[in-house]
Amino acid sequence: MSTRITKRFNRLMREGKKAFIPYIMAGDPSLESTSALIETLEKAGADIIELGVPFSDPVADGPVIQEAGERARKAGVTLRKVLAFVKEIRRKTQIPLILMTYYNPVFKYGEEAFMRDAGDAGVDGLIVPDMPVEEGDTLMPLAKRYGVNVILLAAPTSGDERLKKVAKHSEGFIYYVSITGITGAKLEMDQSIEGSIETLRRFMNNKKPVAIGFGVSTPEEAARVAGLADGVIVGSAIVKKANEGEREELKNYLASLREAIR
């Protein structure tokens, strides 16, 4: 299934480049500020943007992203409002957009209604960190019907059977979680990561991109990750700098990440 995500990765691969994928929390501290931040990220060279959806029990999120989600929730941001926001922002940008949400809001929305509305809004990809591949047998076909890539997660603890399933069913790219913990924890690159990525590539005959996230915060770390993967995801560090309000400092930081990843 060809989406903005696959088209972007295909272009980058032809050019011999790696994808820079920043994560931000939608609605932190407002949807208006999120719109401005997306513009800043795109101008800084982001290839794909991951938008977090605020949720009351974000089990995979570290303290920085949890606090961002709380600010967004206090501003009244919901999954429905995020979809409406994406539909509105599509008037200004065609950058690939991925929603990161937990399964409970999707379940309450209704799987088919959610996937229909997400596709209609212009959402390109979906990450549901608490939905294992084995439990996505209804959501994943619906996503395909409405043109949305469901991006599955693999981790250092994933055995070969799990990696094989992720390699088969993930669309757009595979999200490799570099640490066995929460977002924002310290990155520790070791041989197990390289081995897991080699296994993933073997299972899918190197046909799908792999992006690495969790724990990447410095340009040096981003460069190391880019040496292994097709894309680098940076979240907590960007959320923290964006919330501190120093826009020039944020722009300089984004430029340093972009340069390191390319």
Image: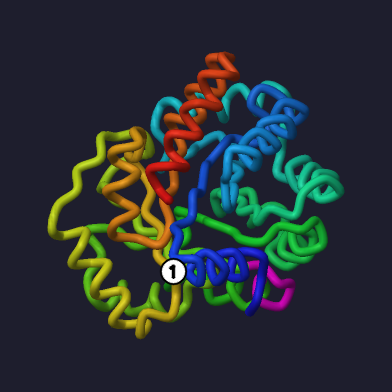
**Residue 254 location (% of width, % of height):** 50, 33
Task: Report which quarter residue 68 is drawn in.
Answer: top right
**Residue 28 location (% of width, % of height):** 64, 26
Left or right: 119, with 138 as reference point? right
**Residue 29 location (% of width, % of height):** 66, 22
Query: Does 86 appear above or below 202?
Result: above
The reply to whether residue 59 is visible in this rendering is: no
Write down the residue under mark 1.
209
Query: Does 20 appear above or below 18?
Result: above
Viewer-closest of 105 and 88:
88
Left or right: 259, with 247 as reference point? left
Viewer-closest of 20 and 121:
20
Q: Name the residue at 67% across, 74% down.
A: 142
The reply to whether residue 201 is visible in this rendering is: yes
Left or right: 54, with 161 as reference point? right
Secondary element type, mark 1: loop
**Residue 118 location (% of width, % of height):** 74, 59
Q: Name the residue at 75% across, 55% down.
A: 94
Q: Name the residue at 21% across, 58% down.
A: 193
Label 1: few (<14), some or many (≥20) within 10 Å? many
**Residue type, mark 1 in image:** Pro
Viewer-closest of 20 and 33:
20
Q: Which segment did they paint magenta?
A: 143-148
Q: Name the residue at 57% across, 46% down.
A: 46
Left or right: 19, with 247 as reference point? left
Q: Decide whether residue 92 is among the magenta residues.
A: no
Q: On the rendered image, what quadrant is the N terminus found in?
A: bottom right
Query: Does 235 appear above or below 109?
Result: above
